[in-house]
Every structure is written in C-alpha cells, then in structure tokens.
Image (spheres, rainbow, N blue to C red):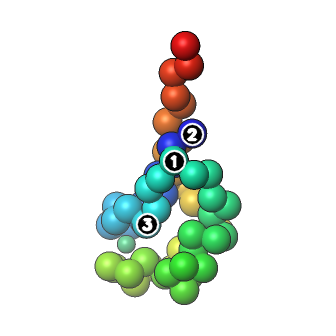
Amino acid sequence: MPLRVACQDCGTVLYEGAELKPPYEIISIFSGKCPKCGKKLSCIPTQIEIIPMELD
Ligand SMILES: [Zn+2]
C-alpha cells in the first residue's frame, strides 16, 4: 500500500513509498521537524495519504 507523508505547513513530502511506516519513524528521520520550513512535526500527521492499490 503506497504511503505519502507530507509537512502540514509547506507540503514538503517527507516520505513516499510502497512500504507502510509508522509516523514516529518518519518523524525521527527528520529529528522531529520539517527539513524545509522547520515546523515541528506532530506524531499524528494530519496530512497523510494512503493510496489503495487495485487488486485483480
Ligand atoms: Zn514544512
């Protein structure tokens, strides 16, 4: 299931991939803040996209 996590403030994509990762793991990669705008990242991302895959 593809997953995309973006900064709530500037929309920078922090993680995009087919692997489902827990949000705290993604946040810890960036030391808890957005690399672009410096906004503190919440452990509960409000902007998260989970794109369902179509199965045959
Ligand atoms: Zn940002």
Tag 3 secondary structure: strand
**Mark 1 and mark 3: Cα distance apart in space:** 14 Å
Q: Residues within 10 Å of mark 2 (few under 14, many from 20)?
A: few
Q: Residues within 10 Å of mark 1 (few under 14, many from 20)?
A: few
Please, is residue 46 above or below residue 53 in the view? below
Q: Which residue is mark 1?
A: 18
The image quadrant where one finds the C terminus is top right
Q: Which residue is mark 3?
A: 14
**Mark 2 and mark 1: Cα distance apart in space:** 6 Å
Mark 3: amino acid: Leu
Where residue 46 appears, x then y in whole percent?
A: 55, 55
- Viewer can see residue 8: no
Callouts 1 and 3 close, C-beta under 8 Å = no
The label on residue 54 is: none
* Residue visible at 51% across and 21% down in the picture: 54
Callouts 2 and 1 close, C-beta under 8 Å = yes
* Residue visible at 34% across and 79% down in the picture: 37
Mark 2: amino acid: Met
The image quadrant where one finds the N terminus is top right
Q: Residues within 10 Å of mark 3 (few under 14, many from 20)?
A: some
Tag 2 secondary structure: loop
Please, is residue 30 above or below residue 15 in the view? below
Mark 1: amino acid: Ala
**Mark 3 and mark 2: Cα distance apart in space:** 17 Å
Q: In the drawing, does residue 6 fall left or right of residue 1?
A: left
The single residue placed furthest to the front in the displayed view is 56
Closer mark to the observer between disc 1 and disc 3: 1
The label on residue 1 is: 2
